[in-house]
Amino acid sequence: MRANSHEPRLLRWLDSLTEGVGRAIAWLVIVMMLVQFAIVVLRYFLGVNSIVMQESVMYMHATVFMLGAAWTLKQDGHVRVDIFYRKLSSRARAWVDLLGTLFLLVPVALFIAIGSYHYVLTSWTIMERSPNGGIPAVYLLKTLILVMMALLLLQAVAQLVRQALIIRGALPNPTHEHEEIV
């Protein structure tokens, strides 16, 4: 979605934050593939096994999914069964998205953030390490839970502002490239 000059500055800022994090994190997929390739080559051709390398792939995988969730939301890329949604008017779609964000996304993200806070804090308190001698920073991996929730909540604010503007007629409701034409 392109930035619209009619969008409020807050909306543009939130979208650009989400876009920046998403694009940066997308590059991690290439690094992850290269490390995984190196693991296979080292293990099967040289007989070398590295727990740190194996765990690094897991950390990168978690980072991509958790920090990319808000970007996926912004791009409307999450899976949805839109049998009825795609037949709705732009304004009705905006209402569905606004209500879904307000009554599903925000409460679930807050629930996860509040519920995982102690879990992450405990990990930081004990400076949790890998039990297998791998990466000595499990607490950083667990912190991604809270970062993911913060990014999702920031994008939820952007979604709420955008949908309210669409409902008021101040913004056009964009069609997404992945939508099927029926």
Image (cartoon, helix red, strand yellow):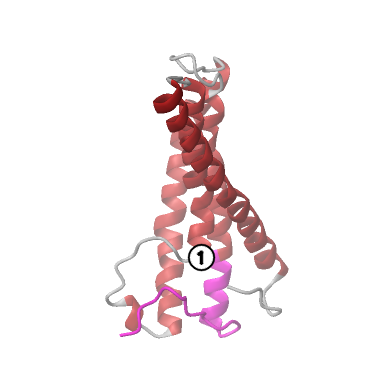
User: Image quarter for residue 131?
Assistant: top left
Q: Where in the figure is residue 29, as x and y percent of width and height? A: 52, 47
Which quarter of the rendered picture does the C terminus lie within?
A: bottom left
Q: Is residue 167 above or below residue 71?
A: below
Residue at the limit of the structure toward the left, as seen here = 83
Q: Nearer the viewer, residue 124 or 53?
A: 53
Any magenta on residue 150?
no
Q: Where in the figure is residue 154, as x and y percent of width and height? A: 58, 54
**Residue at screen point 48% across, 18% down:** 130
Q: Is residue 128 above or below residue 97?
A: above
Type of amino acid at the residue the image marks with label 1? Gln
Which stretch appears magenta?
Answer: 159-182
Q: Nearer the viewer, residue 18 or 35?
A: 35
Direction from residue 31 to residue 110 in the image, left or right: left
User: Image quarter for residue 84?
Assistant: bottom left
**Residue at screen point 62% across, 59% down:** 19
User: Image quarter for residue 168?
Assistant: bottom right
Residue indicated by mark 1: 75
> In this rendering, does residue 121 appear at all?
no
